[in-house]
Image (tube, helix red, strand yellow):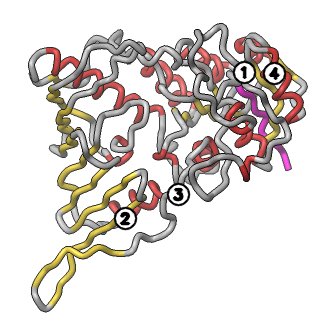
């Protein structure tokens, strides 16, 4: 079997460490240059480590790539030589770099996982495409600015390279089942979508939006926090060009899809639930129905994003479920909601003209 050559940029928690060490409470309490490396167990079996769910899946890009039969994990890049050493000992990777750009230019990789912090992620994504990558996964957040996100999406789209931006719940196969039910008309026509926040880092709602955003109204945003983040913390409404509404409401579930003949709800702690309107002797009634497999079970690590990349390469998907395009939409909506809130809830039309606008994140991102 011909194998895809793969490499990882950034051997932090999502790149490598989650599958070799238990979480440490102080894992982000230093600056980005002097990051802590916990005691690592290179023989640790990911099936048995401390995941909250029962699937026993690996979390990291390293383990996900190594686990796929059609992938040969051949290279890694990080400034921390202890982490490079751990990658070599755990996976037998002999080609190691402290310069990510050098790795991309030298290794001609097919699959690239970019698990760095947010700064520089757009540049590395575009360089990976230039160097011949066939599929790219990045960690979340996707980028700081709309300009960076635009650049990533366009570069990958022009080259036909699938781009998955974050190992989040949306990558789980159960989200594909939910969308299949919607397309089959299981709950009738979609009337509205609800989510607890726009959450460009962890969007669930954008996967179900078929029309481009037209305008937003937002209220209740907070100033930038001491951690560095100024992500939107208020509530709001987005309307698409075809008139669909997405409500961002505190206390809402992960995503609620309300239809003319039923409802689908996702909650991270419960999974998916489905209600359909059925005829009964007493008239039309909305009844909860069994959720068809697969049901959501955490964890939702890099395995599923990588599976989407390969489904795209095989022609089974047009784009990953958590594609760069969808995350870029969520990013623009979140920024627009902030603009609206800052102007007293004024309507903000989309797309935003100023593509230099962006978000700041917790400093360790």
Q: Residue furthest front?
A: 25
Asked whether, in this view, residue 173 is left or right of residue 215, the answer is right
The part of the chain drawn in magenta is 1-9
Determine whether label 4 and label 1 are within 8 Å by CB. Answer: no
Marks 3 and 1, how far apart in space? 29 Å
x, y percent for residue 20: 75, 36
Mark 2 element type: helix
The residue positioned 61% from the left and 17% from the top of the image is 124
**Residue denoted by label 3:** 297
Determine whether label 3 and label 2 are within 8 Å by CB. Answer: no
- Mark 3, Cα crowd under 10 Å, few <14 / some 14-19 / many 20+, is some
**Of label 3 and label 1, which has the lower sequence position?**
1
Marks 3 and 4, how far apart in space? 32 Å
Determine whether label 3 and label 4 are within 8 Å by CB. Answer: no
Asked whether, in this view, residue 152 is left or right of residue 103, the answer is left
**Residue denoted by label 4:** 84
x, y percent for residue 310: 64, 46
Q: Is residue 317 above or below residue 130?
A: below
Residue 181, disc: 2
Marks 4 and 2, how far apart in space? 44 Å
**Of label 4 and label 1, which has the lower sequence position?**
1
Please tell me whether residue 227 belongs to the stretch shown in magenta.
no
Asked whether, in this view, residue 271 is left or right of residue 299, the answer is left
């Amino acid at each position: 079997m011909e194998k895809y050559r793969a490499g990882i940029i950034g051997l932090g928690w999502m790149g490598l460490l989650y599958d070799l060490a238990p979480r440490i409470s102080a894992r982000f309490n230093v600056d980005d240059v002097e990051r802590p490396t916990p005691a690592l167990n290179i023989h640790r079996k990911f099936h048995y480590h401390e995941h909250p769910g029962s699937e026993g899946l690996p979390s990291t890009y390293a383990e996900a790539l190594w686990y796929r039969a059609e992938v040969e994990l051949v290279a890694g890049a990080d400034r921390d030589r202890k982490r490079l050493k751990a990658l070599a000992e755990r996976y037998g990777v002999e080609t190691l770099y402290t310069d990510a750009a050098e790795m991309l230019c030298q290794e001609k990789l097919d699959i690239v996982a970019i698990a760095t912090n947010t700064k520089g992620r757009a540049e590395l994504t575009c360089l990976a495409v230039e160097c011949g990558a066939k599929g790219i996964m990045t960690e979340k957040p996707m980028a700081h600015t709309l300009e960076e996100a635009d650049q990533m999406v366009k570069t990958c789209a022009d080259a036909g390279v699938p781009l998955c931006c974050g190992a989040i719940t949306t990558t789980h196969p159960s989200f594909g089942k939910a969308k299949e039910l919607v397309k089959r008309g299981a709950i009738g026509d979609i009337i509205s979508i609800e989510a607890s926040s726009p959450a460009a880092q962890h969007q669930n709602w954008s996967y179900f939006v078929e029309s481009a955003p037209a305008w937003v109204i937002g209220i209740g945003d907070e100033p930038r926090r001491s951690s560095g983040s100024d992500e939107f913390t208020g509530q709001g409404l987005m309307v698409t060009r075809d008139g669909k509404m997405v409500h961002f409401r505190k206390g809402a579930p992960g995503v609620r899809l309300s239809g003319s003949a039923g409802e689908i709800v996702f909650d991270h702690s419960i999974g998916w639930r489905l209600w359909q309107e059925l005829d009964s002797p007493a008239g039309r009634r909305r009844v909860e129905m069994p959720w068809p497999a697969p049901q959501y079970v955490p964890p939702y690590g890099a395995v599923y994003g990588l599976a989407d990349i390969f489904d795209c390469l095989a022609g089974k998907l047009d784009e990953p479920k958590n594609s760069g395009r969808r995350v870029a939409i969520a990013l623009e909506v979140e920024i627009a909601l902030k603009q609206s809130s800052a102007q007293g809830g004024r309507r903000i039309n989309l797309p935003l003209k100023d593509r230099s606008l962006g978000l700041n994140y917790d400093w360790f991102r």
